[in-house]
Amino acid sequence: MMKETNYDPSFTDGADTKAKEVLKRYFGYDDFRTGQSSIINSLLAGEDALGIMPTGAGKSICYQVPALMMSGVTLVISPLISLMIDQVKALNQAGIHAAYLNSSLTVGQYYKALDYARQMVYKIIYVAPERLLTEEFQSFARSTEISMVAIDEAHCVSQWGQDFRPSYLKITEFIDSLPKRPIVAAFTATATDLVKNDIIKILHLHNPHTVVTGFDRKNLSFEVRKEKDKFSFLIPYLREHKDQNGIIYCSTRKTVEEVTDRLRQEGFAVTRYHAGLGDRERNQNQDDFIYDKVNLMVATNAFGMGIDKSNVNFVIHYNMPKNLESYYQEAGRAGRDGSNAECILLYAPKDVVTNQYLIDLGNDNEELDDFSRRKVRENEYEKLKQMTFYCFTNDCLREYILRYFGEYGQGYCGNCSNCLTNFEEVDVTAISEALVKTVSESRERYGINVIIDTIRGGKNSKIMQFRMNEASTYASMSKESDKTVRLVVNHLLLTEYLILTNDNYPILKLGPNAHYLLNKERTIMMKMMKEEKKIKPKKVVEYTDKKSAAPAVLDVNEALFAELKSLRAKLATIQKVPAYIIFNDKTLTEMAAYLPVTEEEMLEINGVGAMKFEKYGQDFIDVIKEFKDAADNSSTDSNNQNID
Ligand code: ADP
Ligand code: ZN
């Protein structure tokens, strides 16, 4: 292990190259991503740092690399046991001595780990915040050189965030209790100023070097769909992506159950996760997903925090979440390894109502007075509105998200459903008037379907039972498609010509603007899709931070990729680690494109470090060699076109 002192200012000169060497040797990566080297350099120069980077940007490297270059131990404080276990496994695989100290250890194991820690066996120790002030831990910490304390998910100290953890408040007391103040580094994906200031203030960061990296994740594509029947989209999509890993987020436990049941009936292997399940089942299901035993996870937002599964190919939101912060965080769990991934949101008007209900329900924090409570609620309603507008904008979705987080994109990304759609401006006044008139005439008693069926001239039993076939607007819009009318309803809800009640069976009522339409005083224009173009899934595109570098399109050999994956699965089972900890998908993709067969070639592949090569390099080379030989033989045989 390299021994360098972190307090020598002259050290920073060569730090860049040394840090790069460490990155390559242990993690197999050639270059730092945006923000990483600047944070690492300031930590190595002895300054505190605050990294605000989106999920998947690579925060861990920011403290793991300098930890290996400092003389003492680095403590990493992390809120979740699963995250610690995962990270420690990954570090061990990379040949780094690391351990975790949390409640998943028995008392015996805990003391043994502390013993080793005292003997400086570990370079990096993950510790749960509630352990910090215990006597055993304190006695260890006071007698050991602690170079750095890295705080993961640092927004947990802030009461403004959703993830406030009182145990995080102990961190400062712990740091103050140490004989020598270590360097403190804090990391989060939450960008609001309120949270950022809380982190600096509560954790007593000393004039921290703060790095906020761009929020854009170029390898993610974004899509919003407004389906009448979400399953009619979901099922064919899942069939088409059957070998891929995906998360389906639902807003309630009940929906998780419904979606899980339905998908199982359709023959999909799925697992589920929500706060209503027992600990045991939750952990089991989570492991099944992480270890690639089941590749579909249906979950509420309880699932995912701190889960570093890097090979998630798509994240589908079955319901619209309550704000863009949640959406981007959840969607951002796709494509963490840098390969192309899809983020699809299935919007329905009812989602708005569900979220309003959830906001009202969650707004009973007894520590707040009435005034603050009202403020928080208003704030959340505003965020919900911004989220809803995301579903209705016809402009670039990526641009919309980036603007929300205070950044500017280019206005056209070419990789979202809006950039890939042709729109035209359409006059929908007639449909709008018919809808509002029907709601008014039927005295605001029915839901969306009855109103739509009425103006489209439906003949189903409800229409007959409610005698809507006698309404003055009946069949007046029979030429319009159900889809078009539904889009208009959404538009009218958003612009408050109509409102939807907060019931189990939501009722359509007149909104504050309805009179403009009843009195025929307004024209309603809407951007409508000209033709639907499906996002063409491109072959794997390099994740690159260098703006100039054009994304490389790799020529991936699918049959070989499958073989490499099955080798990885075998090794993962033997090593008892999730497959992506051996090598992630992006690494295998590169192997299947560049076909490395020597040590030198193998080390060129992103994600193959010296230690990993030593452990697994030859196994993978063997498979690639065999594949190459077979391909050579078959290409000389004119009758044989099929390699696999
Ligand atoms: P975060 O904590 O910011 O969500 P992680 O630290 O889990 O992100 O990193 C996400 C993924 O990116 C991991 O698979 C990690 O190995 C990879 N990664 C991090 N830094 C680099 C880099 N410089 N080059 C290539 N891959 C990287
Ligand atoms: Zn776009």
Image: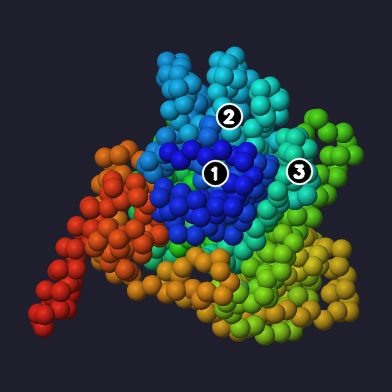
User: Counting residues from the N terminus, which is met first, the one under dot 1 or under dot 2?
Assistant: 1
**In this picture, is 427 found above or below 398?**
below
Q: Count the marks.
A: 3
Please tell me how crowded label 3 is: few (under 14), some (14-19), or many (20+) other residues with Cα within 10 Å: few
| Residue 268 in picture, x, y percent from top left | 37, 53
| Residue 511 in picture, x, y percent from top left | 83, 63
Side (left or right) of 610 relative to 210: left
- Whether residues under marks 3 and 1 lie with C-beta atoms below 8 angstroms apart, the answer is no
- CB of residue at label 2: within 8 Å of ligand 1? no
Q: CA distance from mark 3 to mark 2?
A: 20 Å
Q: Amino acid at mark 2?
A: Ile
User: Could you say which is closer to the camera, residue 19 or residue 177?
Assistant: 19
Quarter in which the C terminus is drawn? bottom left
| Residue 104 in picture, x, y percent from top left | 47, 25
Quarter of the figure with residue 109: top left
Which label number is shown at residue 207? 3
Q: CA distance from mark 3 to mark 1?
A: 19 Å
| Residue 312 in picture, x, y percent from top left | 45, 55
Q: Amino acid at mark 3?
A: Asn
Please tell me how crowded label 1 is: few (under 14), some (14-19), or many (20+) other residues with Cα within 10 Å: many
Which label number is shown at residue 474? none
Q: CA distance from mark 1 to mark 2?
A: 13 Å
Which label number is shown at residue 146? 2
Side (left or right) of 466 relative to 57: right
